[in-house]
Image (tube, rainbow, N blue to C red):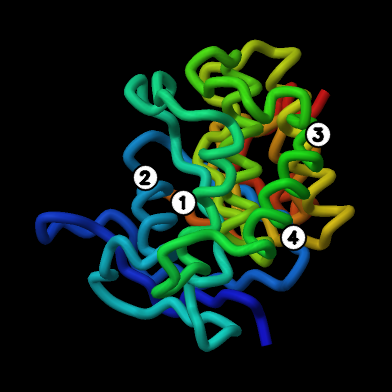
Amino acid sequence: MPQLTCKKLCLGYDGHEIVHNLNFSVERGDYLCILGENGSGKTTLMKTILGLNSPMGGKVVFEKENKTGGIGYLPQQTMVQRDFPASVWEIVLSGCQKKCGLRPFYNKIDKKTALENIEKMGLSELKNRCYRELSGGQQQRVLLARALCAASDILLLDEPVAGLDPKVTEEMYSLINEINKKYNTTIIMISHDVSAALKYADKILHIGNEVFFGTKDEYLNNPSFNFSGAGE
């Protein structure tokens, strides 16, 4: 059974449908990139998978009974979030909040998980630094570590390299790819970067006027899309 399946999904807001009859599934260990123009429904789809939005039709089916409990989420950052006055340790550890349940404190397992993810992201030397003092790339790694604390089964990433310079962007893409390949974590990532999608993803979901779901090779060979210069 796939980790995640969207069946006849219809998405929209204020009674206006923007995505109609969307069908796709994600297997464990997949790296799926969601492409499409602004306003095509990419973020709405991601919020629907998270249970933050209700679909206008169809349904989202999870492999696990705990549904979104196995999902870590890295949203687009706002200026307010970039200026958050907390330490790297505090922010990463906060990713374990959902696992605490009714416990009013973090236990040894939570703290061990946070420390492991800080090390995975190469943030050990920054553990006690204030988040607002970090560079954009360092902040994104902190948020990625936090998302991994929330869940290591599936990571939903909404434009994780937005606002980063080319060198840091490539480092972030490599880090996400390592999480996917080394730890078999399923990646579902919204991106405007077709070249990066074709370099790293193994499956593509394109939504908009043209809807496509399939492998990277099938996407490249689809005559509905233009790839001149992409992936070079």
Label 4: how many Cα within 10 Å (few below 14, some 14–19, many 20+): many
197 to 186, vertically: above or below = above
Residue at mark 1 to residue at mark 2: CA–CA distance: 6 Å
Mark 1 or 2 closer to N-term?
2
Residue at mark 3 to residue at mark 1: CA–CA distance: 25 Å
Residue type marked 1: Ile
Residue at mark 1 to residue at mark 4: CA–CA distance: 24 Å
Q: Residue at x 28, y 70 (%)?
A: 55
Horizontal side of residue 158 vs 226, given as left or right: left
Residue 207, which numbered label?
Answer: 1
Q: Are marks 4 and 3 in contact (CB under 8 Å)?
A: no
228 to 18, vertically: above or below = above
Residue type marked 4: Thr
Q: Which residue is mark 2?
A: 40
Residue at mark 2 to residue at mark 3: CA–CA distance: 27 Å
Give the quarter of the image for residue 193: top right
Of helix, strand and loop, which one carries label 4? loop
Horizontal side of residue 47 vs 192, given as left or right: left
Mark 1 or 4 closer to N-term?
4
Q: Residue at x 59, y 27 (%)?
A: 161
Front position among marks 3 and 1: 3
Instruction: List the single residue furthest toward the right.
Output: 182
Mark 3 or 1 closer to N-term?
3
Residue 129 percent location from the top left of the image? 61, 21
Q: Which residue is mark 3?
A: 174
Q: Quadrant of the C terminus?
A: top right
Q: Which residue is mark 4?
A: 185
Residue at mark 4 to residue at mark 3: CA–CA distance: 14 Å
Mark 4 or 3 closer to N-term?
3
Of helix, strand and loop, which one carries label 1? loop
